[in-house]
Image (cartoon, rainbow, N blue to C red):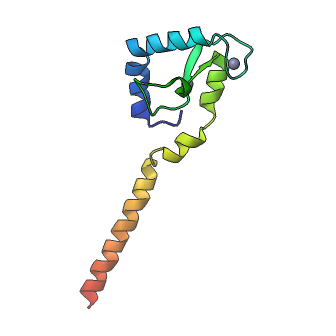
Amino acid sequence: MSYPSRRQRWYREKYLPSEHWTETSRRVRGERPWCEVCQDARSQNVHHLSYDRLWRERDEDLQAICRPCHERTHSRPRRRSASRARPEWWSYAIGWTVVVCIVVLLIEGAISK
Ligand SMILES: [Zn+2]
Ligand SMILES: [Zn+2]
C-alpha cells in the first residue's frame, strides 16, 4: 500500500479492528460471498477501492476479495493513490537545498553590490 506509513499504521491498528469495520466487512462478505477479482474463491477479505470515505464507505468503495487476490492488489502500486502520495523525505531535502542556494546567491549578490 502506497499510503503514508503513519496513516497506514492508524488504519491497521485503529480502523481495521473497529466495530464499524468488523460489521461492514462481515456484511459485504455476506452479500458477496465470492471473490470479485478472480470469482473463483470465497471472499475472505474486504478491500477498499477508495479510502476517501472511511467510516461511511459506499458499497462501490469496497471489494469482496480472496486473500491471494488481496495481497496481489496491495503489492501492485495503485495509480490513483500513487499520484496523491506524499513526497518522499529526499524531495523535501532537495527542495530546501534549492531554497538555501537561492538565498545564498541573493545574499552574495547584495554583498557584492
Ligand atoms: Zn480472488
Ligand atoms: Zn485491501
Give the quadrant of residue 20.
Answer: top left
Q: Eyeballing the image, is 92 above or below 34?
A: below
Q: Nearer the viewer, residue 111 or 96?
A: 96
Give the quadrant of residue 106.
Answer: bottom left
Q: Nearer the viewer, residue 29 or 86?
A: 29
Q: Is residue 106 left or right of 80 when viewed as pictured?
A: left
Q: Write the residue at 45% across / 52% down.
A: 90
Look at the image and tell me in which quarter the N terminus lies: top right
Ligand 2 falls in which quarter?
top right
Counting from the top left corner in percent of width and height, residue 96 is at 37, 61
Q: Eyeballing the image, is 53 above or below 22?
A: below
Q: Write the residue at 38% across / 26% down.
A: 10
Q: Is residue 23 left or right of 96 when viewed as pictured?
A: right
Q: Nearer the viewer, residue 44 or 88?
A: 44
Counting from the top left corner in percent of width and height, residue 78 is at 59, 38
Residue 63 shows in the view: yes
Look at the image and tell me in which quarter the C terminus lies: bottom left
Outermost residue, bottom side: 113
Q: Eyeballing the image, is 65 above or below 83?
A: above
Q: Write the residue at 35% across / 67% down.
A: 99
Q: Write the residue at 40% across / 66% down.
A: 98
Q: Eyeballing the image, is 104 above or below 2?
A: below
Counting from the top left corner in percent of width and height, residue 47 is at 56, 23
Q: In the rendered picture of this protein, how many numbered marks are placed on residues?
A: 0
Give the quadrant of residue 11.
Answer: top left
Residue 18 shows in the view: no
